[in-house]
Amino acid sequence: MTPTPLLELKGVTKSFGAVAALVDANLALDAGSIHAVIGENGAGKSTLVKIIGGLYRRDNGEFLLEGKSVDFQNTHEAKAAGISVIYQEPTLFPDLTVAENLFVGRQPYTRLGFLDRAKMRRETRELTLRLGVPIDPDRDARGLSIADQQVVEIAKSISVGAKVIIMDEPTAALSGIEVERLMGIARQLRDEGKGLIFISHRFDEVFALCDVLTVMRDGSYVATNQTAEVTEDEIIRQMVGRSVENLFPKEVAEVGDAVLEVENLTSVGVFEDVSFTVRSGEIVCFAGLVGAGRSEIARAIFGVDGYDSGSVRIGGAKVARKNPAAAMRLGMGFVPEDRRKQGLAMTAGVQTNITMAIRNRLARFGIITSSLEEPSARNWASRLHVKTNALDTEAQMLSGGNQQKLVLGKWLATEPKFLIVDEPTRGIDVGTKAEVHRLLSELAGTGVALLMISSELPEVLGMADRVLVVREGRITAEFSREAATPENVMYAATHAPEVAA
Amino acid sequence: MSAVMTDPAAAAKYKRFGRPLWRRLLLRTETAIIVAIVLLIIIATATVPYFAQPYTYLTMLLNSAPILLMLIPVTLIIITGEIDLSVGSVLGFSSAIFGLSYAAGVPLSLAAVLAIVGGGLIGLFNGVLVTIVGLPSLAVTIGTLALFRGIAVGLLGTRAVTDFPEEVLGFVISPIFGSPLPVVTIAILVLVVAFAVLLHFTPFGRGVFAIGLSPEAAAFSGVRVNRTKLILFVLSGLVASATGVYYTLQYSNAIGTNGFGFELQVVTAIVLGGVSIWGGRGTLLGALAGGVLIAALNKTLQLAGIGSDTISIVTGAALIFSVVVASVAGSISRRRRGKASAIGAGA
């Protein structure tokens, strides 16, 4: 190992408006090593990768490459300096051949000024062979498996002379054999003296592959561990180690009959054999990693997406497939994940948004007027303390927290029996967050059944009567409020079910 | 905070509108268009010879009736963010079916029904391609525009069916008793009122606006997005083909080129009337006013002896002007309100 790290970050910060994505990021990557960066969703890993890759610029702190301070203005400069990022979903041009993709933007020319295709082909063949995965240079990138596309991306980064290769959740979409192959390539690159940063949620891979583990939490550096000297339990503790006392806990509500019953719900390739119930007065939380399929299950239950088999019942009545209007008639509501796109019409006013889901109910003899809508809009805007002076203020003029209140108001106005709230407090300030928690708790108190999806563990533990852990499209563990701890929920979310049992 | 109880005082603190009525009216395109119509009529009456005669109004409405009829359902389609450019060809196709069936001995009323059903099927075809297949309506309806114009011309060839019953022809172009307005005015008014109620005062209409504002948010609010669009395309096909029957009788002439290029006049009138081409915004009254303004402008320039090329220049300039003004006014007011609400929130 060299005395000067290949790449070093010290006290790097990055904020987006009022939201601090990185508070104090530290990382020291040595040449010839594989360095894992792990942390919960929202811990700042992706922001860190984007700063290293030149997509974002840091606000403060030091960024040294081979001991020299660098400040990349764009991804081009980062690439030129020898930094290469491989994303989970590779970004090849589907209509170009493999060789053309490898040389995109830096094609070799013959002396006559034509593209030197022979050279491109030859080098592509050599590179892929060296990685142990021969790929025909003349085939189109379209139709390559994700694993092969990643190999092409890696070959590309080697051919441009990358010294630092960052892999951002590269194994998320790979099968077991493909993961093995990728890990083999990673080790080979390490042995050639390159520095690798590996981002993954899967502990087995991280422990099998990486030499050093850096843990991040809430945008800050927590600790750097030598893999050989640390246990999984210790890493989990580092990842979740914060108190949940500052959050509003759910009040005790009388839990009644089953309101939502989901049986064997399956959508091939998305989620499989999902069964659970939510009772009145109960808050059930879906915990798990981003991409585990939690939102997809919720969307299918509400009917925005379809599913292949299984059934959804509300109060015993079967909910029609792929028909949100029918689900709503049975008393279902859905506060979606993306309030700006799915929850609200951003250029429409407060009143239009609040009454959008109750337009049929407000109509008298099939006729609806603004005066029929106004009392509901006024009522729900004030109950939720939406900060605005007029009911025709466009939603895009409101702050994120007020927009979220608007979406909640829109769905509370439907007087649901069962409400899905998907990431209800993402990106909103602490004060509003507490208001939302209190509101959901009160709602459960009035007998509404709630399904909450949250990627924030403290929120899950504070609000849930029961925690269902979703991993790779399946419910793999269930914890009662008393039994759920940050450690066991995180463990279940990151490990295959047979281990979790 | 308690979400369970309503505090009437807190509820009353919201103003219904952010700005006073006169400013809201001033900012509306509809207001500008209606003022422009009134000004135009006053100026034309004072300066253009023969403008103030009843016959002028009669011919003005007869000439523009097809556009005014067809723009009514197309307005709703544009508010959902889609477009229907096939209406001119549907008119021509319907005219061909109507004329040919009548010439083949089918009773007039049955021929009309056949033509209208045919138009409804074209609308259904457009709607299915847009909703179920998921193609962009711009491409789909340009396709049907070419397809059914071709079929109409192909069916009739160089032939023209002209021998429609005299009493029907006479009725179509006669004025309503004691007024300078042709009978088709009644059809326009009935259709406008029906569609205006549908668009502005029913849950279906709220869905139409929601789709135009954000298709995804609409779907998440239980709006049947595909079904709504399908219904609108069928309505557009029905109205356009009914217009085709009317148009054939008005000119007593079924030829393949009937209604050629009308789709652009329809869209021009709608956009001029303040309906956003991006969807989500606009009123049926505005679209109708846009159509009437173009009709009045055409008639005025025509009576003043100005050629059709100039008419085209004036209409085009008016359209661009109205779109630019609406966009500039919108961005200015948004910026001002953005500041105001930031101050209001204590930021």
Image (tube, rainbow, N blue to C red):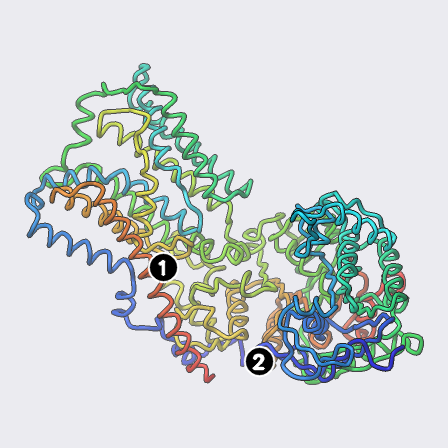
Label 2 sits on a secondary structure element that is loop
* Both marks 2 and 1 on one chain: yes
The amino acid type, in three-letter code, at marker 2 is: Ala
The residue beneath circle 1 is A369
Label 1 sits on a secondary structure element that is loop
Where residue A292 sits, quadrant-wise, is bottom right
Q: x and y percent of residue B198 in the render?
A: 36, 49
Question: In the image shown, does A11 or A106 lie closer to the viewer?
Answer: A106
Label 2: how many residues lie within 10 Å, few (<14), some (14-19) or many (20+)?
few
Q: Is residue A240 visible?
A: no
Q: x and y percent of residue A476 in the render?
A: 81, 61
Question: In the image shown, does A52 or A500 lie closer to the viewer?
Answer: A52
Residue for point 54% across, 43% down: B134
Point out which mark residue B99 bears.
none
User: Could you tell me how many numbered marks the image carries?
Assistant: 2
The residue beneath circle 2 is A18
| Chain of the residue on which disc 2 is drawn | A
The amino acid type, in three-letter code, at marker 1 is: Thr
Residue placed furthest toward the top: B105
Instruction: Answer left or right for B106 relative to A110.
Output: left
